[in-house]
Amino acid sequence: MEHLHDERGFTLAELMLSILLLSILFLAAFGLFAQGFVFWKQGEHKVDMYDSLRISLDRMGREMRYTEGISSASDINNLCFKTAEGKNVKYYCSAHELIRGEQGASGWGYNPVASDIESIKFVYTTSAGAVINESNIAQHKQLYPTTWTVYINLVTITITAKKEGSNVDPVVLTQKVSLRALP
């Protein structure tokens, strides 16, 4: 029994100090892990928005390339055109969704194409190089109410998306679509 009395153990102060140091290390590691998780989630949101916008722009571009013409009902926030198959199509933003409307035998049918959309803008360029944008579209529609779209051969589409409830910066994608006249 006597050899047990000579051995020294940790004092209470040493134990408390080691517990304090380990707690600080664990809190720091947890903070790094939590911050990494936040960055990963933000990156995931950004990739999802980017993919959604890219797919939407690709679909719109494919449909528009062979249109029979842009409708005079189009403006900066709405794009209306007739497809190669003769269907009337309309793209616009409503309630944070990009909507594609198609006129069929039973009327208009509406389908969401992408979500978390903040805005969509259309800028039209004529074959003469005149740009019709939000500053001058009212003037063009007033001067040429039914024919202002006849000479349009380029449409620039800009879509802005932001994930609701997150602090991720908005994603903005732009695509220029050259219209090819159908015979």
Image: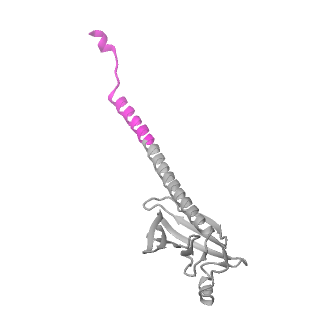
Q: Which image quadrant is residue 180 in?
A: bottom right
Report the side of 76 relative to 125 (left or right).
left
Q: Is residue 67 above or below residue 44?
A: below
The number of numbered discs placed on residues in the rendered structure image is 0
Residue 14 point in image, percent of width and height: 37, 29
Q: Is residue 131 magenta?
A: no
Q: Is residue 11 magenta?
A: yes
Report the side of 26 relative to 43 (left or right).
left
What residue do we see at 70% from left, 79% from top? 130
* Viewport quadrant of the N terminus: top left
What residue do we see at 41% from left, 38% from top? 26
What residue do we see at 56% from left, 59% from top? 54
Q: Which residues are magenta?
A: 1-29
What residue do we see at 59% from left, 79% from top? 134
Residue 128 point in image, percent of width and height: 73, 78
Q: Nearer the viewer, residue 127 or 94?
A: 127
Determine the residue located farthest toward the right in the rendered image. 128
Q: Which image quadrant is residue 138 in?
A: bottom right
* Viewport quadrant of the C terminus: bottom right
Q: Is residue 1 above or below residue 44?
A: above
Q: Which coloring applies here?
A: one colour
Determine the residue located farthest toward the top in the rendered image. 2
Q: Nearer the viewer, residue 151 or 134?
A: 151
Residue 169 point in image, percent of width and height: 52, 60
Residue 175 point in image, percent of width and height: 62, 65
Q: Is residue 146 above or below residue 77?
A: below
